[in-house]
């Protein structure tokens, strides 16, 4: 039995073209999803949440993305934090239990990790995290692509403490925005999101100028660089799998639109509907072949996280793999559906033209294709060695 009902998804689907056209935040979708309890999907029932598993939520996210990709991607950022908190709790670590409690109380968590020109992602930060005497931290820096900018009330972020006696340390913390939308001198949202696709995410640049995370919401101090801390696994696993689910949903929707287009167009040459054209049949069969291989990969990995399966160091290869496979597959399926639908899909009013723009965003999320290949090659072949200097030089 699905969590999000079809009537709600139909309303969300109807609003998507308007948000895209107006470059507007999905405010009405958010209200309805909140009322449906979706913001607590991954919050355990013992915390007052809906108590879904990650395996269940990936299917809901794909249905939501099929209705409105940008809404699903942005809500996914909140789901990632609640998923991280749940994964840690399932493994006996309650350091993020406050996230589950606050999500159950209605707080909305944004994911403020990306920084300009910082491809270290979780392993380094250009944001300064200055320790304060009471154990809180003041963050100063720039975060880019902060989805949910108009509405978040909690900002999950990362900065570098360069001054404590044990520095340098990467500080993971949550900053509260007590009055959503209110002007703040310490946190500013630049309102600069004007993109080709995924427009309703409203992922503006966020400036932090001494924004304080209370001591109770500072939950990790880690050495810079790769870390075996379960937090890093939790973020990586939830991020890659939930992002994969969004793009799988785009693929599902594009395939359905391709099938509809094949059945509804007729060839003047043969007098037959296009679904009798062997080329059209091959294109849609190729698209379905790719989708049918993707879904078991997503379902299995989500279930493995839920069931605490130990893939050891191979986890990272699998996680980057599922994200890259999903974003590549979705793009391929959208391409095939557009070829089948023909010139009509070139219209700005056609849903496939929006999916075409939205699906392009998939390649930018970490891990992008190049860094995923590097992770997989390291898993297969070991790390790259520094170049050897010949002894006779
Ligand atoms: C639709 C969408 C939603 C996203 N949502 C989130 C989110 O909620 N949270 C999150 O943490 N990440 C989010 N991301 C960010 C994503 O994860 C990547 O970090 C992002 O796409 C940057 O990718 P890049 O390194 O290829 O881009 P870059 O090439 O680094 O460009 C990204 C931005 O940084 C600027 N920039 C690049 N170099 C410099 C420089 N030297 N000085 C100043 N500015 C510079 C660019 O002008 C550009 O605006 C989202 C991405 C997309 C596409």
Image (cartoon, rainbow, N blue to C red):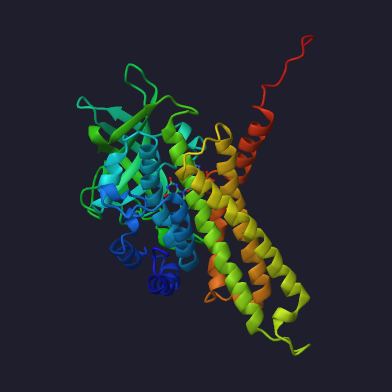
* Residue 262 image offset from top left, x and y in percent: 66, 78
Q: Quick one: 196 or 379, which is closer to the camera? A: 379
- Tell how many labels: 0
Q: Quadrant of the C terminus?
A: top right
Looking at the rendering, which quadrant does residue 135 occupy?
top left
The answer to whether residue 56 is left or right of residue 287 is left
User: In which image quadrant can residue 164 be found?
Assistant: top left
Examine the rendered structure and indicate whether residue 387 appears above or below residue 281: above
On screen, residue 76 above or below 280: above
Examine the rendering and report whether any part of residue 114 can be seen.
yes
In percent of width and height, residue 41 lies at 36, 55
Q: Is residue 382 left or right of residue 355?
A: right
Viewer-side residue, 171 vs 310: 310
Tell me residue 56's x, y (percent). Answer: 45, 55
Tell me if residue 223 comes above or below residue 121 in the rendering. Answer: above
- Which residue is nearer to you in this view: 60 or 66? 60
Left or right of residue 104, residue 24 in this image: right
The residue under the point 62% across, 73% down is: 258
At horizontal 74% and vertical 69% (from top left) the residue drawn is 282
Image quarter (top left, top right, bottom left or bottom right) of the N terminus: bottom left
Tell me: 2 left or right of 311: left
Task: State the residue lying farthest toward the top.
Answer: 392
Q: Quadrant of residue 148?
A: bottom left
Front-most of residues 357 and 54: 54
Do we see residue 346 in this rendering?
no
At horizontal 46% and vertical 66% (from top left) the residue drawn is 68
């Amino acid at each position: 039995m699905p969590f999000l009902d079809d009537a709600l998804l139909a309303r969300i689907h109807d609003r998507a073209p308007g948000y895209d056209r107006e470059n507007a935040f999905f405010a009405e979708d958010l209200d309805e999803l909140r009322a449906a309890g979706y913001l607590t999907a991954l919050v355990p029932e013992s915390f007052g949440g809906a108590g879904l598993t990650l395996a269940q939520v990936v299917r809901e996210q794909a249905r939501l993305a099929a209705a409105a990709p940008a809404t699903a991607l942005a809500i996914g950022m909140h789901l990632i934090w609640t998923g991280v908190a749940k994964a840690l709790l399932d493994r006996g670590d309650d350091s993020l239990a406050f996230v589950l409690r606050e999500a159950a109380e209605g707080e909305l968590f944004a994911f403020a990790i990306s920084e300009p020109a910082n491809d270290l992602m979780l392993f380094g930060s250009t944001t300064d995290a200055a320790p304060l005497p009471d154990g809180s931290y003041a963050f100063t820096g720039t975060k880019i692509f902060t989805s949910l900018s108009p509405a978040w009330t909690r900002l999950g972020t990362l900065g570098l403490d360069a001054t404590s006696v044990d520095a340098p340390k990467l500080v993971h913390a949550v900053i509260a925005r007590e009055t959503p939308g209110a002007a703040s001198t310490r946190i500013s949202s630049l309102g600069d999101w004007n993109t080709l696709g995924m427009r309703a995410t409203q992922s503006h640049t966020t400036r932090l100028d001494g924004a304080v995370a209370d001591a109770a919401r500072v939950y990790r101090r880690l050495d810079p660089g790769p870390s075996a801390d379960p937090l890093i696994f939790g973020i990586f696993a939830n991020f890659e799998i939930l992002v994969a689910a969004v793009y799988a949903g785009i693929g599902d929707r594009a395939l359905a639109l391709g099938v509809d287009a094949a059945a509804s167009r007729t060839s003047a040459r043969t007098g037959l509907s296009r679904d009798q054209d062997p080329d059209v049949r091959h294109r849609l069969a190729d698209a379905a072949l790719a989708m049918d291989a993707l879904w078991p990969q997503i379902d299995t990995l989500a279930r493995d996280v839920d069931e605490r399966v130990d893939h050891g160091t191979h986890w990272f290869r699998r996680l980057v793999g599922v994200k890259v496979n999903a974003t590549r597959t979705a793009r391929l399926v959208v391409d095939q559906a557009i070829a089948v639908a023909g010139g009509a899909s070139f219209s700005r009013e056609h849903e496939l033209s929006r999916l075409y723009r939205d699906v392009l965003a998939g390649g930018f999320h970490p891990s992008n294709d190049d860094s995923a290949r590097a992770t997989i090659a390291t898993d297969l072949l070991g790390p790259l060695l520094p170049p050897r200097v010949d002894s006779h030089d």
